[in-house]
Image: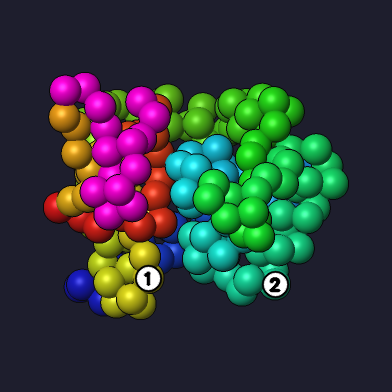
Amino acid sequence: MSSERNSRIRELLDRLLRLHASEDWSEPLNPAQSSALNYLVRANRFSRSPSNVADYLCTTRGTASQTLKALEKKGFIEKASAAGDKRSLSYNVTKMGLLFVQKTSTLDDSLNQIDDATKSSLETGLTDLIRHQLTARNFKSFGICNTCKHHRVDAGQRTCQLLQVPLKSDEGNQLCHEHSAR
């Protein structure tokens, strides 16, 4: 029974992801570009390098680089020197990029049709599934900063103890490539 259920869940996930990706093909971005842009919008300033994008998308550095070049050419992102190292490359999302990711998709509309209890169960189950996949494949978690063992708040000031830097107030809710679960 477990094997049948696992197969059915894989089929459902595959179908859902394909439906979602097919919507991207009708937009100015392909699914890889859309995923990269969504990642960059959610990533903190330390996690916007081409190698971080590649790691998050589980792709090669070359593929990520081409994806980022396409996003830049289309005006959704812009290059920036990484903080502290002028040789390192990082990307910032432009106003056009921010507006693009704020659009609702049919997946968002469908999620709005599901009751909160089902959404909560779905979120918990998918989070567990992703965690197990990351562990099995030895991939980085890219978790939310304020859930990391290195995140501290003292007298209202957020700090990353690993990087020894103060964090901006909004960075506590952003993705970080250095994330290490508590």
Is residue 21 among what the camera can see?
Answer: no
Residue 112: x %, y % from top left: 42, 25
Residue 180: x %, y % from top left: 25, 58
From which residue to which does the magenta span run? 155-169
The residue under the point 24% across, 48% down is 161
Residue type marked 2: Gly
Q: Which residue is mark 1?
A: 139
Identify the secondary structure beneath mark 2.
helix
Give the camera-side residue of 93 and 134.
Answer: 93
Relative to 42, say whether 10 is above or below.
below
Is residue 114 among what the camera can see?
Answer: yes
Q: Quadrant of residue 75?
A: top right
Residue type marked 1: Phe
Q: Which residue is mark 2?
A: 62
Identify the secondary structure beneath mark 1.
loop
Spatial distance from mark 2 to mark 1, Cα to Cα? 18 Å
Give the crowd class for mark 2: few <14, some 14-19, many >=20 residues within 10 Å: few
